[in-house]
């Protein structure tokens, strides 16, 4: 009887492990950043990508998703010209129903100079980031994201006459 029970449970464990692949996890993180991009900004899609108790540590601050999106929306971020991220150097560790991922995030942002009208800035940044992802039902969800700045350079992109 025990052998039969173990035999019947094996497909359940296999199914959960098949759900969590490095490719699916990386795709999920990229989808999160796509929804954060000002060209696609979608607060509801961001909400679908994270757990209800999601926490992000960004700019030395702790934010829930609502606090983070409120900060984005109130800071002028949505008026920026461009936000682009390239994620690379992934290290993925997968468990049965969760995964930890670390990666390099290289971003380029184009935005108006908040201190000088008519000047557009270009900011190149790099972060080392860490994400904890869990399987909720059959959906991947980001539970935690930690972002540490490792490089930042701001330059004048253009000046209007």
Image (cartoon, rainbow, N blue to C red):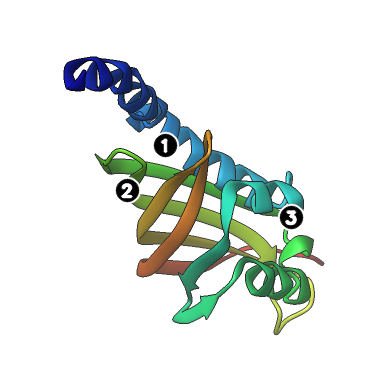
First in sequence, mark 2 or 1: give its number.
1
How far is the residue under mark 2 from the one under mark 1?
A: 8 Å
Residue 10 sits in quarter: top left
- Residue sitting nearer the eye, 12 or 87: 12
Q: Secondary structure at mark 1?
A: helix
Q: Residue at x 37, y 32 (%)?
A: 20
- Residue sitting nearer the eye, 95 or 121: 95
Residue tagged 2? 101
How far is the residue under mark 3 from the one under mark 2?
A: 23 Å
Residue 125 in the image: above or below residue 140: below
First in sequence, mark 3 or 2: give its number.
3
Could you tell me residue 47's position as x and y percent? 67, 53
Number of disc labels: 3
Residue tagged 3? 43
Q: Secondary structure at mark 2?
A: strand
In the rendered structure, are the residues bearing label 2 and label 1 in contact, judged by CB atoms less than 8 Å apart?
yes
Specify whether 145 is left or right of 32: left
Q: Residue at x 66, y 51 (%)?
A: 46
Residue tagged 1? 25
């Amino acid at each position: 009887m025990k052998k039969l029970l173990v035999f019947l449970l094996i497909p359940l464990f296999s199914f959960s492990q098949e759900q969590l692949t490095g490719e699916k996890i990386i795709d999920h993180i990229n989808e999160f950043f796509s929804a954060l991009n000002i060209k696609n900004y979608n607060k509801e899609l961001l909400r679908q990508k994270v757990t209800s108790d999601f926490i992000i540590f960004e700019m030395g601050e702790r934010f829930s998703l609502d606090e983070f999106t409120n900060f984005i929306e109130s800071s002028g971020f949505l008026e920026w010209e461009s936000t682009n991220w390239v994620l690379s150097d992934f290290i993925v560790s997968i468990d049965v129903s969760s995964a930890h991922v670390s990666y390099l995030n290289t971003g380029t942002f184009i935005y108006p100079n908040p201190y000088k009208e008519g000047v557009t800035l270009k900011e190149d940044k790099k972060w080392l980031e860490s994400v904890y992802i869990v399987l909720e039902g059959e959906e991947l969800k980001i539970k935690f994201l930690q972002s540490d700045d490792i490089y930042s350079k701001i330059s004048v992109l253009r000046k209007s006459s």
